[in-house]
Image (cartoon, helix red, strand yellow):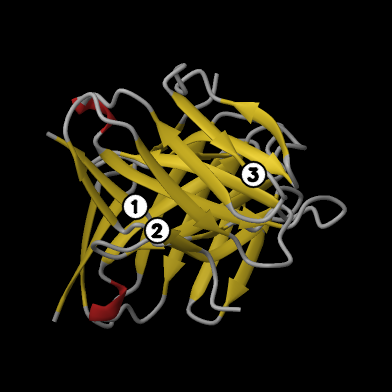
Amino acid sequence: GEDVEQSLFLSVREGDSSVINCTYTDSSSTYLYWYKQEPGAGLQLLTYIFSNMDMKQDQRLTVLLNKKDKHLSLRIADTQTGDSAIYFCAETQGSNTGKLIFGQGTTLQVKP
Amino acid sequence: DTGVSQNPRHKITKRGQNVTFRCDPISEHNRLYWYRQTLGQGPEFLTYFQNEAQLEKSRLLSDRFSAERPKGSFSTLEIQRTEQGDSAMYLCASSLAPPQISYEQYFGPGTRLTVT
């Protein structure tokens, strides 16, 4: 079946690192994605990782993929108040459709 | 190109009325997706097009829902005989198709539907 799970809430202090975790079920997923959603807004693509990679770094963002455990994480270094938002991980269903299956989102609260 | 646009941004309608939403994708993107998002949940896939062909529809998409992309550019999503359970944010996204295989989907701001 298709299922993507995330913890619902994370609170950190400004300047700390944040780690948002996600587990997925579709072993044939080709790509995994992280999106950010601010209140009342659409989804902003932050980064993605190809399923044959273990890690991808993009400025303050580091994505780690453990394909054996079907575990994905997003680390945000030096978290800022502007990073406060809901973060969604998503997997492609199968290898061809591009259809995304989303988790329910992790609300990141950054305290000054 | 300014990205994916959706109109209207907000729609309030009475139960039983029909509504239509429009999505204009990024101009060079040949894939277009519709998702629905309810409060506290992640987006759920509804349907997608490659050019003008509708390639997949979710089981969530009842017979009251229909989507079109007649010329392979903009798309419309129509809901007939709306019900209160249809209240949600309707999101549109676009991407390139294979051989561009990363399927990076770029989302519009959404249309928030409220059925009273």
Could you tell me residue B23's position as x and y percent?
51, 54
The residue where tag 3 is placed is: B69
- Position of A4 with respect to A15 (left or right) is right
Residue A4 in view, yes or no: yes
The residue where tag 1 is placed is: B111
Q: On the rendered image, what quadrant is the C terminus of chain B found in?
A: top left
Could you tell me residue A103's position as x and y percent?
41, 40
Q: Are marks 2 and 3 in contact (CB under 8 Å)?
A: no
Q: Amino acid at mark 1?
A: Thr
The residue where tag 2 is placed is: B7
* Residue in the picture at 61% in, 60% down: A48
* Residue in the picture at 65% in, 36% down: A68
**In terms of secondary structure, where does tag 3 sit?**
loop
**In terms of secondary structure, where does tag 1 sit?**
strand
> In the rendered structure, which disc, 2 or 1, sits on the residue that comes first in sequence?
2
Q: On the rendered image, what quadrant is the N terminus of chain B found in?
A: bottom right
Single out the mark in the foreground, 1 or 3. Answer: 3
Q: Which one is in front, A90 or A73?
A: A90
B51 to A58, vertically: above or below: above
Residue A103 in view, yes or no: no
Q: Are marks 2 and 1 in contact (CB under 8 Å)?
A: yes
